[in-house]
Structure formats: structure tokens, C-alpha cells
Amino acid sequence: MCGIVGYTNFAEKLINEESIINIMAETLTHRGPDASGYWFSDHTILGHRRLIVVDPNGGKQPMTRKKGNNVYTIVYNGELYNTEDIRQQLISKGYTFEGWSDTEVLLIAYIEWGEKCLQKLNGIFAFAIWDMLNESLFIVRDRIGVKPLFYCQQGNYFCFASEIKAILAHPQISPKLNSQGLAEIFVIGPARTPGNGVFSGIYELKPGYCMHIDREGTNIHQYWSLNSHAHDDDFDSTIINVKELVFDAVKRQLVSDVPLCVLLSGGLDSSTIAAIASEVYIQEFGEKLMTFSVDYIGNDRHFQVNEFQPNSDAPWVKVVSDYLDTKHSSLFIETHDLVEALFAAVLARDLPGMTDVDSSLLLFSRWIKNQATVCLSGECADEVFGGYPWFYTKSDPDTVTFPWSRNLNEKVQLYSPELLSIVKPKEYLAERYQEAINEVPHFSGDNPVNAKMRELFYLNLTRWMPTLLDRKDRMSMTTGLEIRVPFCDHKLVEYAWNIPWEMKYFKNREKGILRQSLTGVLPEDVLWRKKSPYPKTHNPMYIDMIRRLTISMLNNQSSPLLPLINKQAVQQLAMSINSETNIPWFGQLMNAPQLLAYLLQIDFWLQKYKINIE
């Protein structure tokens, strides 16, 4: 994986701007610590930071290839999992290759097929290609949005980058926040509305979209979307197909010229990936697979069962590791490290995020990076197959909102009247929810239950899952670690999308169809273990430290957050909060302590990025 950056200006020649692209690219050094490269033309400049995973010598970027009298140049962040399939098609058409990197295959595929090459790609990617003859820039993002891409039009400059920080490094662009950005932070956050970059004038290229930039302007359109239709396979055939798609996705994503591992929690999703990968490693390499898990100092004493976390992962990690005979290691995070990393996590994400859920993954990734460069993770199986409680528990029929955005009223009580008048929380959330519902590709053959579930799955795939993918990418890549997510394979997502709910909820169990398809792959107790989410700390010291930091922030008259909050309400919460305080305001893992930590992240973000609120 890598970091990409670039900009165009058709109004004037880009002369003596080497320092600008250098500064922009250097902000992405964490994504590509192994190498850097730049490419200059009169109207477009491209930069690249490289994390070497495949073909150290042949995959250098920016990469340029010629055809006839035209020249094409690419910067690319991602991984193709069907590189050899495409390479063979291109060889049959007379092309030759200088190396074995997927970068070269991708560039030549575009030279041969143009935008139609996207239909052939299986992978995670964000890339830009400059067409010299036509003076056009083609930018694209993968179907599911595993790899990030942001852009900004400022005057005659069009800038793009893997992360927002690189765009903000351009001297023409400054960090500003308007009313919509405030609403994204205080109402939708830590999620984001697709396409919204939060900062004024900065946008996200949405998953499954591409852009053409030339002298005529900018054109954005969707090249991939979910297609709703009847599911014609019977139950037994569906079981077989799900298993084959999962196995194919995992095996394809094991390609690497550097050490690879699997993140193991002892749950269904990570254990499945570990089982498939372990078999491949033993058969093909004669080696044990490396697996890693994370937990927290004190969780053995302080773990508390709740509606989202029915049991601890630790015993199950050992069960699966022993069963698969993996080379396993565990990290135990200290509470003070977890809290300190809250602010490093903001810098990694460029935004306030999932607080300690982010910071723990950052610390975990940093630790893993000492032993491996590529990881596979079970992320996203819950969105694809229906694993979260909100898929199978009855919700309040009067509550029409994203199922993970609970207790909005409790949250907004912490905001100042001035902020509430600007962001209008209930109205903004309702608008974003209805916007998402209006996008759902309905199928006329759905019965009422499946029609409703199709809406719920769409919300999870397009509004909830991107938050987790952002987290996974930024927290890992800030340490130079690449994490792959086989359950985001687009063929698997497309197939599962149309499986009816009664099959997905087989045996009245979350992800029942996935569990049944993996019979014999894992021990039965692991296979049917009740879902437990990513582990979080239960150590009361965490609450104590967050309380102290919050009180300190409230007493700091220069805090940029103070005009935006109800100081008395925040102080009351900070002083009264304990392990029993229950405000589940975002998903499964973010409760009262995380609500205070989120405010701390916002305060740090406003200061560190020197944000001007318009």
C-alpha cells in the first residue's frame, strides 16, 4: 500500500513547484516509508510514497508507459488480487512487462481498455492516471471504498490525495469548517456522509466512483453499484457458493513478498480467515501462520458483560490458535498508552474518530509492524452477512434513524445553544438518513421483511462500514502496516447482497448462513460462538484519566471547544461518570467514556489543525 498525491492547473504552467509536491507527499510518509517518487509536467504534478509489498524494483512509482505517441503516468495505492489473470489477457494482446508488480498491470490495463478496465479489477485501490496526449487526469476509487481518496478544487488548482492532511499542505488550501462540517462532526460523527470531507471545500471520492479532469472541467460518475435481483440458488447451493467465495477471497489476498499475518480475536470472522490462511501456509510454504491478538491490562479483572460484549475474547483466541497451530502473539495495552494515543489517532484520521477504539488499533498496528508488513482482518463480515444486534433485535418503531446513532438527545444536551442553532441535529440526521434510504436499490420481488432488511443492509454497507474501513486504513497505515479485508471482496458482497434474510438468519443466529457454510472448517463451539465485537478496555482507570483530561479542558479558557459545548452539562457528566453510566451513542463500543473522549479529540483537532469556523 502507499500514499498518492497530485494536482493540476490548466490555467498556468506548474514551474518551480517541486517544494510544494514534496511537502504534500511528505505528509504521507507513514503510508509509504520505503520510497518516494515524483513526476512533473506543464499542468500536472504527481507524487507517491511507497510501502513495498510486491516487486521491490519493478513497482516503483510514479510509473510511466508509452503506447504510440502517447504517454501515460500512474500513481496508485492498493492491491490487485487478480493481477495474473489480467496480465495473461494483456500478454495475449501483445503486451510485455518489465516486472511483476500489479502497478504495471493496472497501468497497461488502462492503456488497453480505458475506463472499462475497472470492470476487470478485483482488489482495493485508489489511483490516478495522467494521459499526456489528451491532457486528462483519470482518478478512481475501489468499489467498496477500502482505500481512501480525497480531492479539492481551489481556484485553478485541482488537488487529490490519499489523506486530507496532504491536501491541507498545499499553500492554496486552508482548514475551514462551515455549518455542514460542524454537523458532520457533532451529529453524524465519528461517521461521515459519503462524499463529505468535513473540511470546507474538501470532498471524498465515493466508493465505486471515478473522475475525469481536463480543460473542459471535472466529470464524476459511478462505475459500480449494488444490483438487486432475485436470489435463485436454493439453500444448499447458497451454502456452497458462500464458502467458495470466502475461500477464494482469502486465498487471493495472501499474495505478498513481505511477512504476512492474520488478526485473530477467536470470533467467527477472524478465525475463518486464519483457518484458510493457515492451511495455505502449511501446504505451500511449510510454515506456521503468524496470528496476533489485542487485549488490555486489567481486563482479566474488570471485564463486564453487556448487550454488545457477551464474553471475553482471550480464552477463544487460545482455542483457535491451538486448533490451527499458529505462531501466536498477544499485545496487552496499558491504559495510559491508550489515552495518550487518542490524539495520535486524530492525526492519523485527520478527524475526531472512534476514540480508544481507534487508538488501540493504532497501538496494535505499531506493535505488529515490528513483525509483519501485511495483515488480514475479519472486518466487514457483520455488514455483509448481518452480524450486529440491530439486524435481529426489534427497534422502536417511532425511531427512524441510523441504528448505530442512538441517544441523540443525550448527546446534544452537551452542546451549546449556539451550536444547536447552527447544526440543527435532529433535522440534519433525519436528512442524511432519508438521503441514504432514497438510494437503496429496491427489488420489486422482495416481501416486506426482505424489503426492510435490504434497507438495513444498505445503510450498514454504505454508512456504517466506511467508518470502520477509515479506521482500519488510517490506524494501520500511519504505522506503515497494510491490513486487507477479504470480506470486502466485491464478488462476495454482490452475492450476499441478494441472499434473502431467512437464509442469512439461519437457525435464528447472526450470520447464520456464513456459520453454516464453514461447517468443518472450525470447531463447532467457535463456529457458533455468539458475536463479540472488537475488544475495548474495561479498566476503571480509563474513565479516571478521561475525567481528568475533560476537567482540564473545561478549565482552559483558550479551548476552541468551549463555545460549542454546554460547559455545565459536560462537567456534570465528567464528575458523575462511572462504569455503570450508559449512553450508547455510537454503535457497540462507544458509550459515556467515549463520548467525553470524543469531545477531547474535537478540542485537540480544532487546535492542532488551526481550524477556522466560518
Image (cartoon, helix red, strand yellow):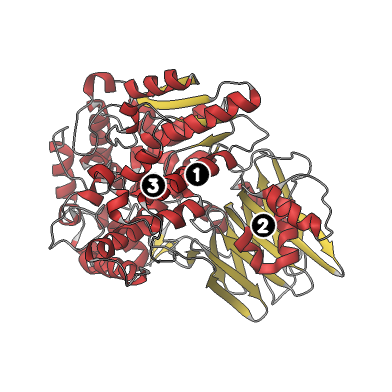
Name the residue beneath numbered marker 1. Answer: 244
Left or right: 532 as drawn, with respect to 611: left
Left or right: 513 as drawn, with respect to 110: left
Name the residue beneath numbered marker 2. Answer: 20
Residue 332 occupies quadrant: top left
- Structural distance between the alpha carbons of marks 2 and 1: 48 Å
Instruction: Give the percent coordinates (x, y) of residue 564.
Output: 26, 57
Q: Earlier in the sequence, mark 3 or mark 2?
A: 2
Inspect this view and state whether residue 171 appears. no
| Vertical relation: 46 (above or below) 576 | below
Instruction: Give the percent coordinates (x, y) of residue 578.
Output: 15, 33
- Structural distance between the alpha carbons of marks 3 and 2: 58 Å
Q: Residue at x 59, y 33 (%)?
A: 373
Left or right: 147 as drawn, with respect to 383: right
| Vertical relation: 25 (above or below) 444 | above
Name the residue beneath numbered marker 3. Answer: 236
Q: Nearer the viewer, residue 486 or 157?
A: 486
Q: Earlier in the sequence, mark 3 or mark 1?
A: 3
Nearer to us of marks 3 and 1 is: 3
Say which element carries label 3.
helix
Q: Estimate how packed mark 2 is, as few (under 14), some (14 to 19) or many (20 or more) residues with alpha carbons within 10 Å.
A: some
Instruction: Give the percent coordinates (x, y) of residue 11.
Output: 69, 77
Q: Are marks 2 and 1 in contact (CB under 8 Å)?
A: no
Residue type, mark 1 in image: Glu
Residue type, mark 2 in image: Ile
| Vertical relation: 28 (above or below) 341 | below
Q: Earlier in the sequence, mark 2 or mark 1?
A: 2
Which residue, as the protein is rendered here, is positioned at the far right? 69
